[in-house]
Amino acid sequence: MVAAGWLSKDVAIIAVPIVTLFLGLLIGWLAQRSGFCSIGGLRDFFMFRHTRLLYGYLALIVGAFVGYLVFWLITPSAFENFFWILHKGLMPVPGAPASLTVAAYVVLAVIGGIAVGLIGVLLGGCPLRQVVMTSEGNIRSLWFVIGMCIGAVVFAAWVSGWGVALLKMTGIA
Amino acid sequence: MAENKAKETEKISCVDTLARNPLYVGLAIGILAALVQVLLISAGGPEAYGFCVACHTRDVVNVAVNDIFGTKLAVAAISQNAVLPVLTVIGVLIGAFVSARYYQEFRTKTGNVKSYIWYLAGGIFFMIFALFMGGCPYRMGLRIGYGDIVALIGVVAIIIGVLIGIKIATAIAEREE
């Protein structure tokens, strides 16, 4: 079965940039108003027991689940593998194409997660917050965003290949 | 007329009160991400890809680099198939800028060269590790909502990282005192 949403493929490929641009505009406005930040929410909770931002992140998970559930009931064909674990077991939802074992994905998630949390706390925010702070005129965040752009190319060109090779060598992948 | 205007202002401030509460913003982002999937999934996967700062930045940058230099850097299928890649991050930049200007919260904040280098290196490594994990914390949230256990492990790892980061930040602050 081919995944099919409300827009046909011919329309969807043109709609992708337009819809995501409007989504971004809306989220940018909301995030600027609320100071929305996932890693900031965790930090505030563990340091000061402030729950304001943390509830925002938890609400995102709940909102995503409710959204997926409702739209899945309306248009099941757009959500082929909802609820994921019932279809694919422990395999994670893929990002860019890669075919590794479950163990390798777990190792990557743990290493990546710890590093992401660490960097996020030390530099004062998750990527969304950094992007929003850039728009608010913070030059340091601008450098963070530039770093993200460089990191994307570095990852795709070299690191992902090396990582997979290393995992295969150790027998995890 | 004046009454109407007062009502209008009240309406705007009511929306603004909602927008200033992260709880409603989080709910809105989650639901919007699901809406984007139901609209656009025909253009290509992956699933639970409605909103992600790391992956969507990767798509924009890598598609641009591929077009300019003729390379074949990996991007998500949806950005590969569509006429232009997902522009969410560009939207966030513009939306937040307009909002900051509108509410007069735009302030240019500079740092020293050392801090710029730290932020640049932080951005590079953040992106690499986020892509290892398969997304930024937001896509992790979407994936948990979609029923992905590895994403849950990823968020637990983020929490461990945050706790380590707090320890380091506290140690640095104490040394500076």
Image (cartoon, grey):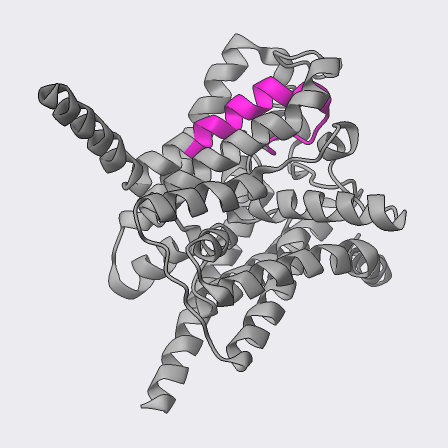
B122 magenta-colored? no
Please say if A83 is above or below A127: above
The span shown in magenta is B29-49
Residue positioned 54% across, 61% down in the render: A142
B47 magenta-colored? yes
Q: Is residue A108 visible?
A: yes
Q: Is residue B14 left or right of residue A119?
A: left
Q: Is residue A57 visible?
A: no
How far from the left and from the top, in percent, is residue B170? 36, 78
Q: Quadrant of the N terminus of chain B?
A: top left
Q: Quadrant of the C terminus of chain B?
A: bottom left
Quarter-wise, where is residue B26 in the image?
A: top left
Residue positioned 27% across, 41% down in the render: B21
* Residue furthest front as drawn: B1
How far from the left and from the top, in percent, is residue A33? 33, 44
Residue positioned 38% across, 43% down in the render: B99
Main SS class of the magenta portion in the image: helix
Q: Nearer the viewer, residue B130 or B22?
A: B22
Q: Nearer the viewer, residue A34 or A59?
A: A34
Q: Is residue B60 left or right of residue A117?
A: right
Q: Is residue A50 left or right of residue A144?
A: left
